């Protein structure tokens, strides 16, 4: 009887847990439902008072208009997020490797200084950052490239992302046995050869974490984009903010544009998500 009661309690607990999870899923999907149904409504039906109602007339006109307005910004976001993520990943990986496996005097102090960079708010560096990028334009003679263009925005995000990328890679690399590094040294491999042949091939989880982190950060950036780029270089977030009517708010177009602008980050999580927690938690109990 005791075993039967225990079995019943276990079954009841399992069903309760399943019900709670379903409830959380439903709550999480409610905003997505509103986004989807509103995006297929004509402007006459797209109103906050009818947000929960299904469209009486289904139309893809809002999607067409949203794509036409958002397409240049989406391409600018790709030009921003892809190279920015890859550069941040490369620099963070090399920094983390040196700080974890090739110790030198002052390494801990340097790592601490790196970490301070994570706590500097965007607003605190905006004016000197603008002055720096304007100075780079004048120095190189490339007007509208660093200040007013995508390259300057990439540079700002790469520099700002170095601290967190270094932290993630450093915490991951301390879990790699030191014996592997010593064995490569015995075989005559130098720092770069060891990094390329031994460390980098096992870095997939950490790379996935950094790519997801930086891609999401760059793709969703608004503040830097508004201050550091011009209208021809605005990414999707700024273009999304500008999809608004003068007299009436085109809710259906805004909802369609919001879904379009969120697809790339969802794809990144789907493709790399299985590595995310493994890479994020690596080094949590060591180093």
Image (cartoon, grey):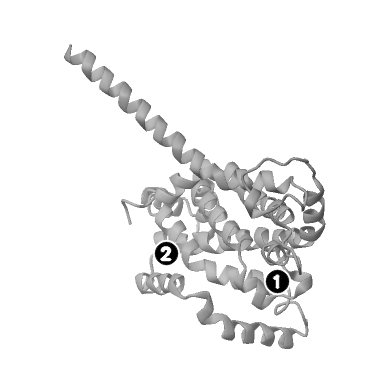
Left or right: residue 125 compared with residue 230: left
Question: In the displayed structure, does residue 158 sit left or right of residue 151?
Answer: left
Q: Which residue was labeled with disc 2?
A: 99
The percent position of residue 178, horizontal first and vertical second, equals 37, 51
In terms of depth relative to the viewer, which is nearer, 223 or 274?
223
Q: Quadrant of the C terminus?
A: bottom left
Q: Nearer the viewer, residue 194 or 211?
A: 211
Who's the residue at 64% across and 54% down the image? 48
Q: Is residue 145 above or below residue 164?
A: below
Q: In the displayed structure, would residue 124 be above or below residue 275?
A: below
> Which residue is labeled 1 in the image?
151
Q: Secondary structure at mark 1?
A: helix
Q: Is residue 183 above or below residue 73?
A: above
**Mark 1 neighbour class, 10 Å CA radius: few under 14, some 14 to 19, many 20 or more:** many
Answer left or right for 64 relative to 227. Answer: right
Where is residue 197 drawn, in percent x and y? 54, 49
Nearer the N terminus, badge 1 or badge 2? Answer: 2
């Amino acid at each position: 009887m005791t075993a039967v009661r225990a079995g019943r309690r276990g079954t009841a607990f399992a069903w309760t847990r399943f019900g709670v999870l379903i409830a959380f899923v439903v709550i999480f999907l409610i905003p997505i439902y509103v986004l989807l149904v509103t995006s297929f409504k004509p402007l006459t039906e797209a109103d906050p008072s009818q947000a929960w109602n299904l469209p009486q007339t289904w139309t893809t006109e809002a999607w067409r208009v949203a794509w036409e307005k958002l397409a240049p910004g989406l391409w600018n976001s790709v030009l921003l997020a892809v190279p920015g993520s890859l550069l941040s990943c490369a620099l963070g990986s090399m920094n983390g490797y040196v700080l974890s496996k090739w110790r030198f005097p002052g390494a801990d102090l340097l790592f601490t200084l790196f970490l301070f960079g994570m706590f500097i708010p965007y607003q605190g560096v905006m004016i000197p950052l603008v002055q720096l990028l304007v100075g780079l334009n004048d120095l190189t003679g490339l007007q509208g490239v660093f200040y007013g263009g995508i390259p300057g925005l990439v540079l700002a995000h790469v520099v700002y992302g170095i601290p967190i990328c270094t932290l993630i890679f450093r915490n991951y690399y301390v879990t790699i046995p030191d014996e592997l590094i010593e064995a490569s040294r015995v075989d005559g491999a130098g720092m770069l050869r060891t990094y390329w042949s031994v460390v980098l091939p096992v870095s997939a989880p950490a790379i996935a974490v950094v790519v997801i982190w930086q891609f999401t950060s760059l793709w969703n950036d608004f503040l830097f984009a508004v201050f550091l780029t011009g209208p021809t270089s605005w990414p999707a977030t700024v273009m999304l903010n500008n999809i608004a009517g003068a007299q009436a708010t085109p809710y259906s177009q805004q909802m369609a544009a919001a879904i379009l602008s969120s697809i790339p980050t969802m794809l990144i999580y789907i493709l790399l998500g299985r590595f995310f927690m493994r890479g994020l938690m690596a080094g949590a109990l060591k180093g």
